[in-house]
Image (cartoon, rainbow, N blue to C red):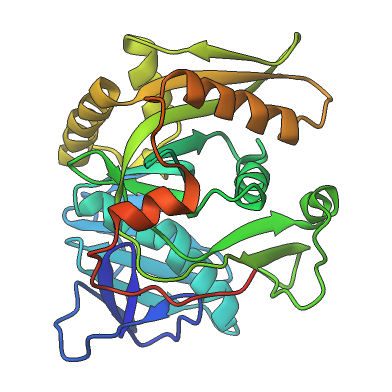
Amino acid sequence: MYAGYGLLIDSELTLPDLARDAAPGAPPDVVVRLGPVAPPTADAVRLPLGLWVDGERIGIDVPGVARYSCSGGSLITVQPAPGASDDALRLFLLGSALGCLLTQRGLLVLHGNAFVVDGGCAVVLGHSGAGKSTLAAEMHRRGHLVLSDDVVPVDAAGRAVPGWPRIKLWQDALDRLGLPSSGLDRVDDRFAKFHVPLDRSGSLLPVPVRWIYVLDRYDGPLRVVPVTGAAAFVSLHEHSYRNEVLVGDLRRTHLARSADLARTARLARVDRPHGVDSVAASADAILADIRSTTTPGAPSGRRAIREEQQHATRPTRAVGA
C-alpha cells in the first residue's frame, strides 16, 4: 500500500516514488490494477490527446505505452502495450491518469507547482516549458518547502494537497541551477529529464492556497500584474490539469471550485521578458509580491509548515536532496 496526495493507493504496479503507508490494514482510497480496459462506447465523448469520457470513466490512450481507465474516482485500470516499460507506465499513471482521477474525486487539479511561504501556499501555473519546475527548484533552494510539482490538487476548502517528494527537471534546468544529474533517475530513457528528490521530513497536511501566479512572456521588463474578475476564471481553466476532460458534471464542479478559490486567493500574472533566463528574478518578484500581501511577523518557510502540521497522521518518506 502506498500513500500520496492524501490517499492510500493499492497498486499492482510498483510505485517507488510514493511513500509506503505506515498504517497497514486501512482500506485503500484508490486501487490500481493491471488488466484489459474496455474501449470507449459509441456514446463516449472523444477528446484531443487520446482522452475520452465515457459515463463514469475517463480514458487515456497513450500509443506504445498503455490504455488507462479511471473509474468513479477510485479505480485506475492499466492495459500495458506490448513491450512498454514499467517506468513509462508509471509516468502516465502518476501524471495524466491520477490527475483525471483526482478531478473525478471533486478536486480542482491545477497544472503547476506549489510551495509554502509564510504559512500559506503559493501556486505557480504555466504551460509546458514555461519554467514552473525550475522555479520550484529555485524556491526549494531558498528554503521553501515544495508541496507538489506538475499536478497540484486543491480541495474543497481551498487547500493544496501535497504530492510526490520530487521535481522533474530537464538537463539544461539542472545546469542553470548548478545541480548534477549524476545519480538521478531519468523520467524516461528517451530524453534527458530527471527526477530530483526533495528532502522532506515528517508528515504533510494540505496548506491553504493564498497566492496563484501564472507565468507568461512578453516584450517588456519583468512585472507582476493582478488578475481579477472573469480573467481569473479563464486562467484557472486554462491551467487546469488535463482540462480537456472537464465536460458535464466535471465542468460544473470545476467552476464551483474555481469560484471558491478566486474568492480566497490572490491571482496574478508574472510577465517575463522574452529570451531572458529570469528564474532568480521571477522568484524575487513573486516573493516580493507575497511579502506585500502577508501579515508582518508571520512565520515563514519550513518553520511555518511544521507549526501548522504538527498533528499530521500520515508520514511522508524523507528523501535526501
- Where is 198 relative to 11, above or below? above
- Where is 253 relative to 36, above or below? above
Q: Residue furthest front?
A: 297
Q: Does the image show residue 239?
A: yes
- Where is 23 relative to 243, above or below? below
Horizontal side of residue 22 vs 86, given as left or right: left
Q: Residue furthest bottom?
A: 25
Q: Nearer the viewer, residue 209 or 74?
A: 209
Horizontal side of residue 304 vs 72, given as left or right: right
**Number of residue marks:** 0
Q: Position of residue 49 (x, y in %)?
A: 49, 48
User: Which quadrant does the N terminus fall into?
Assistant: bottom left
Name the quadrant containing residue 156.
top left
Q: Nearer the viewer, residue 66 or 166?
A: 166
Q: Residue at x 45, y 86 (%)?
A: 14
Q: Residue at x 33, y 11 (%)?
A: 230
User: Which quadrant does the C terminus fall into?
Assistant: bottom right
Q: Residue at x 27, y 49 (%)?
A: 103
Q: Position of residue 46 (x, y in %)?
A: 35, 46
- Where is 83 relative to 301, above or below? below
Q: Residue at x 81, y 57 (%)?
A: 171
Q: Nearer the viewer, residue 271 or 38?
A: 271
Horizontal side of residue 64 vs 306, given as left or right: right
Q: Nearer the viewer, residue 127 or 181?
A: 181
Name the quadrant containing residue 232.
top left
Q: Position of residue 75 (x, y in %)?
A: 23, 71
Q: Position of residue 21 (x, y in %)?
A: 31, 83
Q: Does the image show residue 148?
A: no
